[in-house]
Amino acid sequence: MFTLFINNQLDKIISPEDIMTKDETYVLGALSSCVGKGDDFRADISSILATRVINYSLTLAEKGSVGKDITDRLIKLLTDCDSFTTDLKYYMIKEIVNGNKVKFAKLMTHPDVVKMAVK
Amino acid sequence: MSRIAYINLSFNYKDKELELEVLHDHLAYIGDTKELKELQKKFNEPITDYSLELKDNLYFLPGTSVPRSKLKETHSNLNIKSTRDITRASKIITSRKSMDAMFEHTYGRFIKVSFFKKLITILQELDYDIYNLTEVNDLLEDYESEYIQVNYFNFLNQNAFERDFIKKYPQELFDKIRDIATSKSSKWYYKLKTNKFCEEDFEDFLKADTYSDKTILAGINGDDSVEIDEEVFDNLKKMLSSSDEDNHTVAAEIMANCNYEDSAGYLLCLLRDYDYALSGCKGSKHVNYKSFLSYFDHNQRYSLSTAELYNKLEATGNFNLKHVKIIFEAYIYELTRVSNEYTVVSEVRLQKDVADKIGYDLIYDTESETTKVIAHEQQPA
């Protein structure tokens, strides 16, 4: 399992903290290079990243308040990022909203997120 | 504003004594009075035709469910604020639930002040010793209300009292006292819940106009909010039919955050058909979802009939061809399924006055399973 992890270069993929806090252009580029595009799209890595984003967001919410920067980053990932498929984006919305509805209430007030959720 | 005193009457028939005790006075409105009707108007007929203005300072009455953060966000250009000081408010916002939130609707025994005074005189003439009368007289000197509230006083089974009374006064008067002493004097009344609304603010509340929360709620999600069209409606139905309850929460959030006016028809269908799933989901107690329910005046876990869906369209000002047609077609099966081997429902159409209101006839043909939309020659004004 560990060898597989290393072989897949999963140790080198962008951390959830970086996804949520680093510069937007850098993050989108890093995600794109991890996940790939077209025929090279790695759905497995995309799924792992989605789960990490969910866990990071919910842990952050558990520890304290969720700032506008975090909400904005989530909105970006959920609406304007090709590194996650529509079903993964819906999964992220579902898990985050159900995980902490109060702290992520603003997420669902964004029209583009709502549009994405009903696709 | 009516402050009603509560006076306790303790009779001691044997020693011919009556002890009066003013227990408290409270702000109350007795049923069927002009004052109550005027008060109810403030809650039931608020101003609906208005728009929020620059730097509006809003006071929300108890029972209103307007999410403040959403309001500030969607009207960020207007710098809207909310205040807890009614004297500083530019608009007082009310909802259908505000009266119940501010007043306790209860039952009490009331007698007219004039009659109370007469009763005291009679008792004095019957040689009753009356205690604390000075205190009561002081209270009644500047008393504004026509009524006082009293406890249940049962002197009517006292034969001695009746005998004394009848000797001096007509039987009708005794009968009147008996009526008042028994349940006939009981009235419904509304008493201000002082833990919900400060009594000192009540005068200001009465002087000011009230504004409907529905006008704010109609635009609470902003102009760019999602409209629920047929495709979204089908997706939401799938989400609400899902066995995964997390999908219900997301669906409820989408419904609460969409454009209510543009989506009214489909939203009402969802409320009717999936109320159980919606009312059980995680977000159903959140102010965001409650404000959505408040827009439609819908109580969770209350089954809606088709007629009520039309009624809610009317109440929210969304009674137009688009939404009426959605509801008409969604529940046509309720009418056509009554066909049997002897009789057939071949056509379903709107009532004439409904068609007049929207300016169109909707005629559903059972055989072709299609709805014809026929515009009236003269559109309603």
Image (tube, helix red, strand yellow):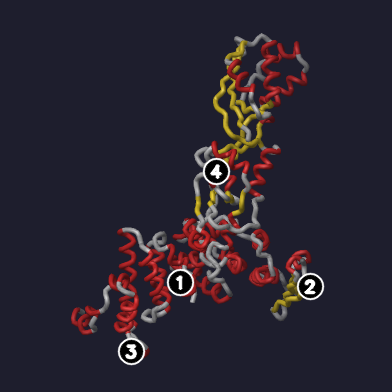
Disc sitting over residue A27 in the figure: none
Residue B46 seen in render = yes
Residue B310 found in image quarter: bottom right
Q: Secondary structure at mark 2?
A: loop
Q: Which residue is mark 1?
A: A113
Q: Position of residue B19 (x, y in %)?
A: 58, 16
Q: Which residue is mark 2?
A: B376
Which kind of residue does numbered mark 1 sit on? Val
Mark 4 vs mark 2, foreground winner is 4
Which kind of residue does numbered mark 2 sit on? His
Q: Which residue is mark 3?
A: A40
Q: Is residue A94 left or right of residue B217?
A: left
Q: Residue at x 62, y 41 (%)?
A: B206
Mark 1 vs mark 3, foreground winner is 1
Alpha carbon of mark 3 to alpha carbon of mark 4: how far? 65 Å
In this orientation, which residue lies closer to the viewer: B48 or B14?
B48
Residue B204 found in image quarter: top right
Alpha carbon of mark 2 to alpha carbon of mark 1: how far? 41 Å
Q: Which residue is mark 4?
A: B87
Q: Secondary structure at mark 1?
A: helix
Alpha carbon of mark 1 to alpha carbon of mark 3: how far? 27 Å
In this orientation, which residue lies closer to the viewer: B307 or B195?
B195
Q: Chain of mark 3?
A: A
Q: Secondary structure at mark 3?
A: helix
